[in-house]
Image: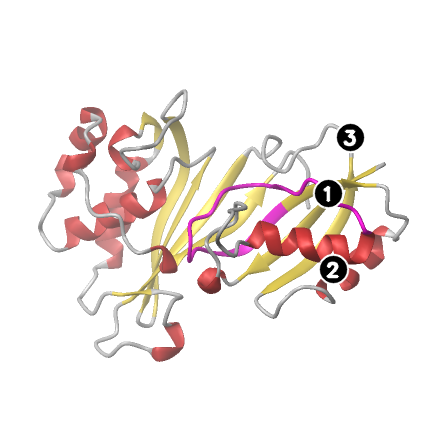
Amino acid sequence: MKNLLFVISFDGKMYHGWQSQKNAVTVQDTIKKAFFNITGDKANIIGCSRTDAGVHANMFCFSVKTKSTIPTDRFVMALNGQLPFDIAASKCIEVNESFNARFSCIKKEYVYLIDTGEIRNPFLSGRAYHYPFFIDEKRLNETAKHFLGTHDFSAFCSADTVVLSKIRTIYDIGVKRNGDIVSINICADGFLYNMARIIVGTLIYTENGKIKESEIPQIISSLDRTRAGITVMPQGLYLNKVFYDFEI
């Protein structure tokens, strides 16, 4: 039995997130079907993260145990031959038996793309949030630093989030501009449900004056979801990088 780690990327526009669902098309179910077609295994596909409907991934990892005799270096081509055009595998390596793509992950980075162009770009439909207003990315980059460190992020997650602890550590957060596109990168040891999207929504609120920059520490300590900004649309969000205790 081999334990394999795959690196994939996907356009999430046509999927109801990663996690398998009975009455919806998901990335996990699509991977399961492709894997079965090449190995005959009804394998347990373990994803590194749950992504919402419409969310994309520049880098996503899953692990799977298999008895297949397909050489590891052939698996990428074999899997891609069975996957639809909007999902692609880029790497496959054998890992130790105890490795788990989800629980072995030490941190993740998400990036959120905002299109600030006055006219919406049809080529960014479903891939960036169209916000046709001025964003001062340098000021927003400074504002974002309030989120750095270890905090209880209860004010920045969906009200129906059920986890043992809402304490997370944000290691890095930054705001950059490339033409009309403003990107917000957030790297943390883990993310609560809708956490990245609410942080982005809160930062946007500081730009349009609905929330003062100085209020962010108080909002964090309040643990009150109603004090933070909106949950921005999922289509601008990408899982950008996944980190383990070894180089992939």
Which residue is under mark 3?
A: 97
Badge 1 marks a residue whose secondary structure is loop
Q: Secondary structure at mark 3?
A: loop
Q: Residue at x 31, y 30 (%)?
A: 153
Look at label 1 and name its amino acid: Ala
How far apart are labels 3 and 1 at the CA level? 15 Å
The magenta segment is 40-61
On the image, the x and y values in percent for residue 176 come to: 35, 58
Whether residue 193 is in magenta: the answer is no
Residue closest to the eye, 7 or 148: 7
Mark 2 or mark 1, which has the lower sequence index? 1
| Left or right position of 197 against 22 | left
Q: How is the image coloured?
A: secondary structure
- Mark 2 vs 3, N-terminal side: 2
Per the image, the residue denoted by label 2 is 79
CA separation in Å, label 2 and label 1: 14 Å
User: Residue 64's x, y, as percent?
Assistant: 72, 41
Q: Residue at x 83, y 51 (%)?
A: 72
Q: Main secondary structure of the magenta part?
A: loop
The residue carrying mark 1 is 43
Q: Is residue 202 above or below residue 53?
A: above
Q: Any magenta on residue 57?
A: yes
Residue at the (88%, 53%) spot, across then down:
70
